[in-house]
């Protein structure tokens, strides 16, 4: 049960992060899935951990990080990302929810689409305001903040549920220990 909650929490965080930058959470999941046991992807999502996938994600991330800093080009990029970010959110949500057999794959895909699509829509609405109010000079600052936020949200989506689960287990063990000692004293 705790493992299911960990994966569900990760699914929400990773798909939300994909709304800001599709490639940061995808690359984090791919690399951590390949080199650690923090993320274990089941079929067909384990294809994400292949060298080809990781290489493609590195290239796509480099392109995204570069073009998103340039006024006018970032608007074109956001138009293209209207399809990519929700799809990435759906993939990330489904990949994390896939280990929970009770979650419908269709529901997982829809949840990921909604989360990433909602964040992307908010970004798409606010970015033109930044461009207009700063004559494009503030775009690179906002873009860097979005990338940093996407990185830390992705990292927390992976690590925080594990930390919370560990804290719950330690708290439960301490509570049980206290209860047993209390019963012996009574």
Image (spheres, rainbow, N blue to C red):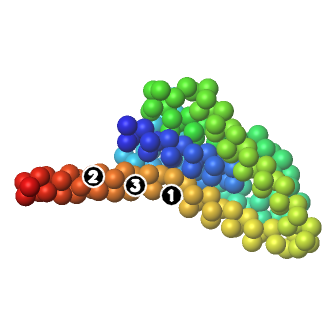
Q: Position of residue 58 (x, y in %)?
A: 60, 52
Viewer-side residue, 47 vs 147: 147
In the rendered image, which quarter is residue 111 located in? top right
Estimate the spatial distance between the alpha carbons at disc 1 and disc 3, rounded to whole Å. 11 Å
Q: Is residue 183 above or below residue 40?
A: below
**Quick one: label 1, few (<14), some, or many (20+) residues within 10 Å?**
some
* Residue behind mark 1: 156
Q: Which residue is mark 3?
A: 164
Q: Please give left or right for residue 103 compared with residue 75 in the image.
A: left
Between disc 2 and disc 1, whose residue precedes?
Answer: 1
Which secondary structure lies at badge 3? helix
Query: Tag on residue 172?
Result: 2
How far from the left and from the top, in percent, is residue 93? Answer: 57, 39
Q: Position of residue 142 (x, y in %)?
A: 75, 68
Residue that appears at 88% across and 60% down = 128
Q: Residue at x 22, y 57 (%)?
A: 174
**Residue 22 disc label:** none
Q: CA distance from mark 2 to mark 3?
A: 12 Å
The residue tagged with tag 2: helix, strand or loop?
Answer: helix
Quadrant containing the C terminus in the rendered view: bottom left
């Amino acid at each position: 049960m705790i493992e299911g909650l960990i994966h569900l929490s990760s699914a929400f965080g990773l798909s939300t992060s994909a709304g800001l930058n599709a490639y940061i959470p995808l690359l984090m999941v791919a690399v951590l899935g390949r080199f650690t046991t923090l993320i274990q992807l089941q079929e067909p999502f384990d294809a994400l951990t292949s060298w080809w996938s990781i290489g493609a994600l590195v290239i796509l991330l480099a392109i995204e990080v570069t073009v998103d800093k340039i006024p006018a080009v970032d608007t074109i990029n956001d138009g293209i990302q209207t399809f990519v970010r929700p799809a990435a959110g759906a993939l990330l949500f489904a990949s994390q929810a896939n280990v929970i057999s009770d979650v419908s794959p269709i529901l997982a895909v829809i949840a990921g689409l909604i989360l990433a699509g909602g964040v992307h829509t908010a970004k798409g609405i606010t970015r033109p305001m930044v461009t207009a109010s700063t004559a494009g000079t503030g775009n690179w600052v906002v873009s860097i903040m979005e990338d940093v936020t996407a990185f830390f949200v992705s990292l927390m989506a992976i690590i925080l549920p594990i930390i919370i689960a560990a804290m719950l287990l330690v708290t439960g063990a301490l509570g049980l220990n206290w209860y047993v000692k209390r019963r012996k004293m009574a």
